Amino acid sequence: ARVYYGYKADADYSKERLLIKVTYYKTKADALKGGNDGVDPLGKFVRVEYTSNNPEDANKQPDKWALRPTWWFGVPNGLKADTISQIRLVRNERGTQEASSPATPGAKKLKDASRKGYVVASDHTYNNIDQWKHSVSRDYYSGSDKTIDGKGWQRMVGITKNEKDYDNSGNTKGQWNIYKDSSANGLQGIFADWESAGQRYYEMSYVAEMTDDAWKQRDQKPLLFVAGIYRGVGKWRYAAGTTMHAPKIADNLELKYPKPTPVKNLDSLDENEQKAVKTAINDANKSNDKDHPNLFDQLLAKDGISVDTKGNATITFTDGTK
């Protein structure tokens, strides 16, 4: 599910220019590397990629923003803050490699950006949140220091008590409540990048590990991502949010069939025979190493194997899927 909000109810602007992509990986190393290697629908590590002001429609161009807009990117509660790494911000500016190349002999040429007619003006990677914050133009707002509501939701989105800063003509104000809910997987933090005027688009990404709750209860506790643009002059605000339901466990965890369990009557298993079938299913799928549980061990719900009197087995996982 995706939601959008725009200055003077122009939600389509947010839909076109605030893009969010999340990919699940088996290991942190795979997530840091990116690409298709190591992609795993049941992976615990995510690579989050935000693209701002770069319309997918090739006939449209990134807008030229005057004055000093702030581009911001969210971090949901379902990610472990202390695992956030490889925070990367790429600033792509209108121009060509030739026109942007310095006249000084031996000076480094700017690279072509992913969009034709643009060059990479800067490309920086930060190892953690503290490194990101070491700048007058970048900040990180989090619930832990009580700034996410004031500097985040009130300033960036305009959701204030006086209700004067949010244009609710499209009746969209209530859609942000779930993203604000700290008891669920609403935002725990916001990366903010205060930029100068210019015609640019931005690619921001980071890697993180999911919490156990978000990983195991992926359907009940989806990851909620939000990104936006805020400019103080004129109080222009745009925001986009997406509810990221991770792939269902039952659809992606391959189970092994146990050897047949002998029973007296296939149409009427007694209690001991039912228990024997449950044990056989568990033994066929569990890890043989107690110190290294496998996905079946970790994602099987409590009392997740049930067998009826006709021998039909149902396996329930931590996300409620069967």
Image (cartoon, rainbow, N blue to C red):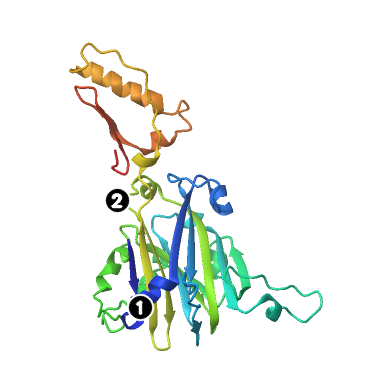
> Given the image, on which type of amino acid does mark 2 rest?
Gln
Mark yes or no: residue 23 visible: yes
Which of the two residues, 133 or 9, is positioned nearer the viewer here? 9
Residue at image coords 53%, 72% = 202
Q: Quadrant of residue 277?
A: top left
Looking at the image, is 171 positioned above or below residue 29? below
Q: Quadrant of the N terminus?
A: bottom left
Residue at image coords 52%, 60% = 206
Badge 2 element: loop
Q: Are marks 2 and 1 in contact (CB under 8 Å)?
A: no
> Where in the figure is residue 35, as x and y percent of width and height?
55, 53
Neighbours of disc 2 within 10 Å: few (<14), some (14-19), many (20+): some
Q: Which mark is residue 220?
A: 2
* Mark 2 or 1, closer to the camera: 1
Residue at image coords 29%, 18% = 276
> Given the image, on which type of amino acid does mark 1 rest?
Gly
Residue behind mark 1: 6
Badge 1 element: loop
Q: Is residue 27 left or right of residue 188?
A: right
Q: Residue furthest front?
A: 59
Neighbours of disc 1 within 10 Å: few (<14), some (14-19), many (20+): many
| CA gap, disc 2 and disc 1 | 29 Å
Q: Is residue 119 left or right of residue 149?
A: right
Q: Quadrant of residue 231?
A: bottom left
> Where in the figure is residue 72, as x and y percent of width and height?
45, 72
Residue at image coords 43%, 51% = 210
Q: Quadrant of the C terminus?
A: top left
Q: Mark 1 or mark 2, which is nearer the start of the sequence?
A: 1
Q: Is residue 205 left or right of residue 268?
A: right
Q: Is residue 201 left or right of residue 319?
A: right
Looking at the image, is 161 positioned above or below residue 292? below
Mark yes or no: residue 84 visible: no
